[in-house]
Image (cartoon, rainbow, N blue to C red):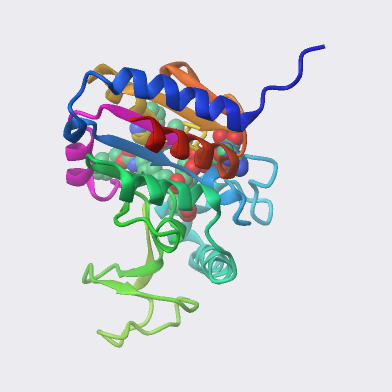
Amino acid sequence: MNAAPDPGAAAAAAAGWCAARLAGIPAAERTIVILTGAGISAESGLATFRGPDGLWEGHRVEDVATPEAFARQPELVHRFYNERRRRLQRVQPNAGHVALARLARGWPAPVHLITQNVDDLHERGGAPSVIHMHGQLTQLRNRVTGEILEWSGDCWESTPCPRSGATGQLRPHIVWFGEAILETEAIDAALERPALFLCAGTAGAVWPAAGFAGLARERGAAAIEFNLEPTQISDRFHRVVRGAAGETLPAFVDALLDGV
Ligand code: BJW
């Protein structure tokens, strides 16, 4: 009987493969782009969207995270985000977040960390800069003036905007289905010519993020996926590392920083 592959060893082997691929590229040009999704925060205790824990009070994310749902039932949508904002204050970054921050700080070339997550666990894990393409739980937007506000408490339709004083104007600063993603200029610049593309904890079910791996590969990047399970985009990667991100990413980052 074959023993199950050790995720840490598989991650270190993938780092060795990357080091060999990058060897011919000058150190300062070994740009890394990292895309993360809900799976990287799962070990911190935040629910993913499409796993067994993916329903919220029986609602699929597609039924709550749309402008139409907010127009129809604003209090339901506010409650969804209020609960997640409260939960965020009770959780901590895990070893996966910390490992990526170590990579960003220790790598000789630019490292662009793009996250679909609306939590702040990359920042709290030490990442020097994070591109939040789907918004942030800790921000609200005034839908009349467009102003963005830092926010840590609950928000309801009855909550007055601290600037305008009016009620019924605030919404989560979150990108819902059918809305344009944020930080497109930073994302386009990051994806211009990556040497290495790392993708951790995303199912690859939501666009445009699901297309980034293919784009990075077309532009010459070595591409590695880190996920517990096969995903909708696994075939876009040169290597896949199966296992929990909190185990595989630290092993990968240690080996990569040692080897190049
Ligand atoms: C682990 C693990 C562990 C677990 N370790 N791994 C092309 C084709 C088809 C459709 C479209 C298309 N282009 C656009 C669309 C429409 C749409 C879309 O993608 N629809 C799909 C349903 C098909 N996209 C959009 O509407 C986007 N906007 C857009 O394209 O705008 C165009 C436009 C331009 C100009 C003007 C106007 C419009 C917007 C997408 C917004 C997504 N928003 C959400 C919710 C809001 C954020 C929030 O509330 O948190 O973002 S949806 C939800 O899915 C959330 C996530 O960021 C996103 C991705 O989910 P993710 O991260 O992949 O999580 P899961 O749960 O799906 O997967 C977790 C993974 O982790 C699994 O694989 C596990 O195995 C793994 N895992 N534990 C490692 N310990």
Residue occupying image coordinates x 21% and y 71%: 145
- Start and end of the magenta stretch? 179-199
Q: Is residue 181 magenta?
A: yes
Expressed as whole percent of the image width and height from the top left, the position of residue 158 reads 45, 82
Instruction: Identify whether 174 is placed above or below 19.
Output: below
Spot the residue most to the right: 1
Spot the residue most to the top: 1
Residue occupying image coordinates x 46% and y 33%: 255
Q: Quadrant of ligand 1?
A: top left
Where, quadrant-wise, is the C terminus in this rendering? top left
Residue 238 location, quadrant: top left
Instruction: Identify whether 50 is placed above or below 173.
Output: above
Q: Is residue 43 magenta?
A: no
Instruction: Identify whether 122 is placed above or below 226.
Output: below
Residue 139 location, quadrant: bottom left
Left/right of residue 24 with respect to residue 256 in the rendered view: left
Left/right of residue 238 with respect to residue 64 in the rendered view: left
As rendered, which of 86 and 196 lies closer to the eye?
196
